[in-house]
Amino acid sequence: MKHIILIISLSFLLTGCSQTPVEDPYVVVLGIAQDAGVPQAGCKKDCCVDRWNDSSKHLMVTSLGIVDPNSNETWMIEATPDFPKQLDLLTGDDPNKLKGIFLTHAHIGHYTGLIHLGREVMGAQAIPVYAMPKMAKFLKTNGPWSQLVDLENIDINKMKNEKSIKLNDRISVTPFTVPHRDEFSETVGYKIEGPSKSLIFIPDIDKWEKWEKDIAKVASENDYTLIDGSFYQNSEIPGRDMSEIPHPFIVESMEVFRELKDKSGIHFIHFNHTNPVLIQDSDERKDLLNSGFNIANPGQKMRI
């Protein structure tokens, strides 16, 4: 009898030691600002002036990280001008945890951080960079990005619209095209799916009515929806024709989602430095939050 108990005990101990506790993968917010960051270069207006001398008030450019704690793997969405700091936040003391970078389009805040993978900095080796066909061609045929390809610092993986990419056994990413100012490439958003939840990421889009999909329906079908919050309302930039830089104003988006019962999963992101919701005690920020919406915060984690 003692021998049987001993065998059972040893079996239990060995089984327990061999199992790794399962931790949910998650998406982490690495930045929330529009392409130029906050404060913005050359800006001496009230929205930036008090931020210049206080680094704690600086906001990095919009980027997300995908983390699987069990496999010790990470992926980055967008390679921003703040890439060095965001890479450190995502991977800590081991940049080898970075298994790939997903790009949305060829505007400066979304891909220019790739330059840090080159021989002048990291001298990376074949980092997978996921891009749509026009974006891939842009990188391959324009310097200095083409040097990253030629020196095999990056390995471009072409994506297809709405074709899912399996990162590992637990996480997949699906690109989908959205209407935007596509001077150099197409523009995509992403659906990120984990074992239990899904997240939509659309940092840039012209106007919701230009998209063939109903964003309110998309939001209702997913757990988190992180969307373009560049500007709060029209005339936010005095003397500038804002039709030249079309984005859905936050007040427009709030109206689009008005009938949605649960708005807690909707997080605005990609804020221009002029956006009043960045001011902690502003009426605009209070109205947004009181209406049931959320603002993406740096370091925020969303389990998928």
Image (tube, rainbow, N blue to C red):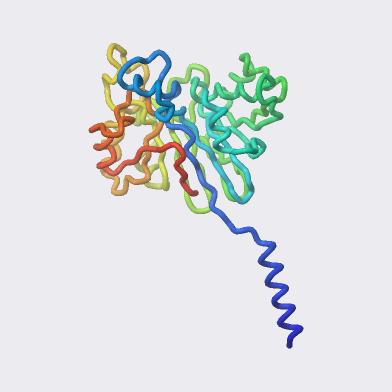
Seen from the viewer's position, the closer of residues 240 and 73 is 73
Q: Position of residue 204 (x, y in %)?
A: 42, 28
In the image, taking residue 24 as reference, residue 279 lies left or right, namely: left
In the image, taking residue 128 as reference, residue 217 lies left or right, namely: left
Seen from the viewer's position, the closer of residues 194 and 163 is 194
| Vertical order, 1 against 34 (above or below) | below
Seen from the viewer's position, the closer of residues 93 and 233 is 93
Image quadrant occupied by the N terminus: bottom right
Residue 294 shows in this picture: yes
What residue is rendered at 32% in x and 26% in y?
A: 275
Seen from the viewer's position, the closer of residues 165 and 9 is 9
Residue 214 shows in this picture: no
| Vertical order, 157 against 22 (above or below) | above
Q: Position of residue 74 (x, y in %)?
A: 59, 40
In the image, taking residue 257 as reference, residue 77 lies left or right, namely: right
What residue is rendered at 69% in x and 62% in y?
A: 18
What residue is rendered at 58% in x and 47% in y?
A: 68
Seen from this angle, which residue lies furthest front? 53
Seen from this angle, which residue lies furthest top? 239
Q: Position of residue 290 (x, y in %)?
A: 25, 42
Seen from this angle, which residue lies furthest bottom? 1
Q: Position of residue 134 (x, y in %)?
A: 56, 22
The count of marks equals 0
What residue is rendered at 38% in x and 43% in y?
A: 219
Residue 102, picture quadrant? top right
